[in-house]
Image: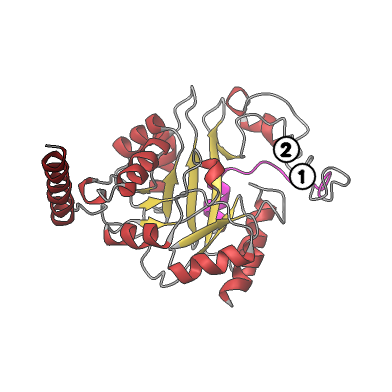
Amino acid sequence: MKSKKFKTILAILFVAFITSVIVNPKAPPTRYYDDAPRTLVIAHQGGDGVWPGDTMFAFENAVQIGSDVLEMDAHITKDGQIVLMHDEEVDRTTDGVGLIEDKTLDELKQLDAAYDWSIDEGKTFPYRGQGIQVPTLNEVFEKFPQMRYVIEIKLTKNPIDAPLCALIRQHNMQDKVLIGSFHDEAMKNFRAICPEVATSASRTEVRNYVLLGKVFLWGFYAPHFQTIQPPWNPDDSLGIQIMTERFVRESHAKNIRVEPWTVNDPALMKQYIEWGVDGIITDRPDLLVEALGN
């Protein structure tokens, strides 16, 4: 009896696997990756391991050394302006305190955006007092219209989706912007209002996709995103090792691009390049440019 039941289970799993291979819905098309034949250098916050992150100074340097993509974090101010900073609060990186969305743009422009940036655990602050301000997304779009962007959005009480979409359309950047978010609701809201802009998988989408892959049932998954950006470190994904060569291969079969974060080790960069990842999100774009031989 047990043997018969085991065979039945195996037959069901086999049929499910074959069905998933046949069905295998693909990711929605996007022009974001047009003319991108190799692994993209994605400067995390413009290269927060080299320069004060999410500042115009960092973005300028990232572009100058040959980065392909500027990654940044977008927030909306009290007066409806979209500004760039990693945290929801200004406390960790500036000489101010409080939530971004409780401040006006003028108030944020008074802050020193590089005040607490340090690469030696706070012994020195090399860019403090040099006039580095909190930038707006509009300023960055105007300065670097040729660049690709990865923009992470948060879930805030002041909705950012409509003004962000309007700004992307205003600058005709629909094919040069990829929107990401850890928050399912924020991603759902943005996709509804700005469907022409590419997106990455939200936290729940990453989890569901990865778990189906562990039991070889990726073929049943219908992605609403074009890119998946998994952490390289299992500690950032509930102890699950996501980044494998098989993961990259199977994702590509579904037309899903793979861009791991935040990869700062040159040896790991080279391994991922060999696996054929589409981009690498890094605090050290200088090391990635070198690893690619650019």
Q: CA distance from mark 1 to mark 2?
A: 6 Å
Residue 153, image x, y percentages: 48, 38
Q: Residues within 10 Å of mark 1 (few under 14, many from 20)?
A: many
Q: Residues within 10 Å of mark 2 (few under 14, many from 20)?
A: many
Asked if residue 215 is among those painted magenta in the image, a careful observer would answer: no
Asked if residue 133 is among those painted magenta in the image, a careful observer would answer: yes
Residue under numbered circle 1: 117
Residue 14, image x, y percentages: 15, 51
Nearest the eye: 12 or 83: 12
- Residues tagged 1 and 2 counted as in contact (Cβ below 8 A): yes
Q: From this viewpoint, is residue 145 visible? A: no
Residue 154, image x, y percentages: 50, 33
Q: Is residue 168 left or right of residue 97?
A: left
The residue type indicated by label 1 comes to: Trp
First-in-chain label (1 vs 2)? 2
The residue type indicated by label 2 comes to: Thr
Q: Which residues are magenta?
A: 127-142
Secondary-structure class at tag 2? loop
